């Protein structure tokens, strides 16, 4: 069955009960009878990771956010380890935009939380309980974890809904989105239309999406469809004259902020008043949320901006990456960025600037690097890479940045009998909902070779003819990975073990 009962929905989806809100469109919700003094909601409450990075029991925090029309209301958020609540979260309000229409964005901050613990919360509006639910904090070291990874998703189509539902069925602790959360330009209005309604839908089904956001935190990275403007020289930027609600990555999302101030921040152009409005709403999130890291269970995650306006060979960036990866005691290490350094697709093969970071990843024993951008699924064999000619990495705002080098490929690893890889596995999981690329590449290894890479057979598997998501489960020194398609079928899987 594709539909879940309301009882199962309430049990499995964070227990959220919307006590008063009714949909009046694809992205607006109102109190019954349009109760006086209650604003229309344009984003129902959703859970975000917040600024936390390291795992500290008793110091965990996250964000419960929601968005309304620009109409004042008196909100209160309570939380606690039982449904007796007992603690009150601080709430911050900022003004954002959807197109040229103002919105109010609210962020409640439960804090001083224990790791691996369920907490209950409820939100009041104008003296009445509006909704109630629960969330679970990050797991400590030693705990088993499950997470979903996918990208290039919120396009507004049937595949978005199917992948949201399949992810929901897998019961992940969190989602690692590989970028391009919404199409086409990363606007707040597009989040309202394509993201919140699908990933925070009141019903879980193939036709509607799923109530993930209200209980499952989403991490993500900056991607090309977040930055769709062009400056006078054709450079990539956020153009606030064209789109007043640009860069919703920085205003809708609440992610860790432990990264350095970027040497190449997302460029901004347009009317200064509009830019200042954006900066006020984003506060410290712009530009500090461009690069960040966090721990979850026995895993460490490093998330990077890979857009073409930056030079990833910047020494300060590489030093921070190296320091971040060597300072963690996590057993497993993941890196996520949007533009795949190693892929065989016809759309983005030449965008290879992130290859210069491979030696650093190898030195500090990264296990997986996750990407999107290519709208399909590609998995490499484990390999090591030594750049040979990397002058193109400095060609900022160019999509033609070929970096040649020497591959050393672990051909013995098969993820079944031989489960200890020698090298990094690069995994492109960009089939989250947008139209697919290179469907004819599926099951045709002859198309997986490139003469520019000396025809090195670094690709192990490609599924480009269907939408899919990646599931990881980590328990101690064993990792299980499976690729689940929109029909719920497992199309690829492997096991990785550590000595």
Image (tube, rainbow, N blue to C red):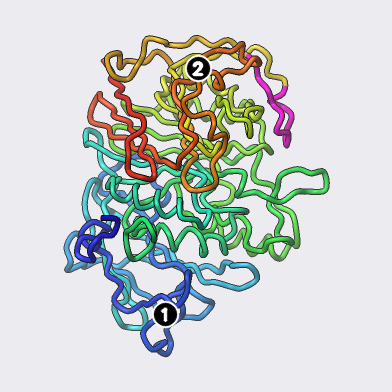
Q: Nearer the viewer, residue 414 or 251?
A: 414
Range of the magenta residues? Answer: 392-404
Location of the C terminus (image quadrant): top left
Secondary element at tag 1: strand
Residue lying at 25% horizontally and 46% vertically, measured from the top left: 115
Location of the N terminus (image quadrant): bottom left
- Quarter of the image where one finds residue 9: bottom left
Q: Position of residue 58 (x, y in %)?
A: 25, 49
Upstream in sequence: badge 2 or badge 1: 1
Q: Badge 1 is on which residue? A: 30
Residue lying at 51% horizontally and 71% vertically, measured from the top left: 104
Q: Badge 2 is on which residue? A: 458
Is residue 453 left or right of 487 when viewed as pictured? Answer: right
Overall secondary structure of the magenta stretch? loop
**Tag on residue 68?**
none
As measured in the structure, the alpha-carbon distance from the residue carrying label 2 to the one carrying label 1 is 53 Å
Q: Nearer the viewer, residue 69 or 479?
A: 479
* Residue 397 is one of the magenta-drawn residues: yes
Q: Nearer the viewer, residue 446 or 267?
A: 446
Q: Position of residue 16 (x, y in %)?
A: 28, 65
Is residue 318 left or right of 323 when viewed as pictured? Answer: right
Secondary element at tag 2: loop
**Label 2 crowding class (10 Å Cα cut-off): few <14, some 14-19, many 20+?**
many
Whether pointer 2 and pointer 1 mark residues with C-beta atoms closer than 8 Å, the reply is: no
């Amino acid at each position: 069955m594709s539909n879940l009962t309301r009882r199962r929905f309430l049990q499995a989806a964070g227990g959220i009960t919307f006590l008063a809100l009714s949909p009046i469109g694809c992205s607006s919700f109102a109190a019954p009878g349009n109760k006086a003094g209650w604003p229309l909601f344009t984003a129902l409450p959703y859970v975000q990771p917040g600024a936390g990075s390291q795992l500290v029991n008793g110091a965990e925090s996250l964000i419960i956010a929601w968005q309304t029309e620009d109409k004042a209301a008196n909100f209160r958020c309570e939380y606690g380890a039982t449904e007796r609540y007992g603690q009150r979260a601080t709430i911050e309000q900022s003004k954002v935009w959807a197109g040229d229409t103002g919105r109010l964005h609210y962020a409640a901050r439960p804090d001083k939380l224990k790791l691996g613990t369920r907490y209950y919360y409820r939100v009041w509006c104008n003296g009445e309980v509006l909704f109630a639910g629960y969330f679970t904090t990050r797991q400590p070291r030693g705990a088993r974890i499950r997470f979903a990874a996918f990208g290039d998703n919120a396009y507004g189509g049937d595949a978005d809904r199917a992948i949201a539902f399949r992810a929901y069925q897998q019961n992940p602790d969190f989602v690692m989105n590989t970028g391009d959360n919404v199409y086409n330009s990363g606007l707040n209005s597009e989040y309202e239309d394509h993201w919140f309604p699908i990933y925070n839908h009141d019903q879980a089904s193939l036709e509607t999406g799923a109530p993930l956001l209200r209980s499952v935190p989403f991490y993500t990275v900056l991607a090309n469809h977040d930055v769709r403007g062009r400056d006078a020289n054709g450079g990539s930027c956020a153009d606030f004259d064209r789109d007043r609600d640009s860069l919703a990555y920085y205003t809708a999302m609440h992610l860790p902020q432990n990264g350095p101030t970027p040497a190449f921040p997302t460029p901004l152009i347009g009317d200064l008043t509009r830019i200042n409005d954006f900066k006020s709403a984003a506060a410290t999130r712009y530009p500090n949320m461009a690069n960040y890291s966090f721990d979850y269970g026995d895993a460490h995650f490093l998330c990077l901006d890979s857009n073409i306006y930056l030079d990833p060979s910047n020494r300060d960036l590489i030093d921070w990456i190296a320091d971040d990866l060597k300072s963690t005691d996590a057993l497993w290490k993941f890196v996520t960025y949007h533009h795949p350094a190693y892929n065989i697709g016809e759309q983005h093969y030449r965008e290879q600037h992130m290859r210069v970071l491979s030696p650093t990843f190898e030195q500090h024993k990264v296990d997986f690097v996750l990407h999107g951008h290519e709208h399909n699924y590609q998995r490499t064999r484990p390999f090591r890479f030594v750049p040979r000619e990397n002058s193109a990495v400095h060609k900022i705002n160019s999509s033609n940045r070929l970096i040649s080098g020497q591959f050393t490929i672990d051909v013995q690893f098969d993820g079944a009998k031989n489960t200890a890889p020698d090298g990094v596995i690069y995994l492109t999981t960009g089939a989250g909902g947008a139209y697919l690329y290179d469907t004819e590449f599926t099951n045709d290894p002859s198309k997986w070779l490139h003469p520019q890479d000396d025809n090195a057979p670094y690709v192990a598997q490609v599924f480009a003819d269907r939408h899919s998501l990646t599931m990881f489960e980590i328990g101690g020194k064993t990792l299980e990975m499976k690729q689940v398609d929109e029909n719920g079928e497992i199309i690829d899987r492997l096991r990785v073990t550590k000595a």
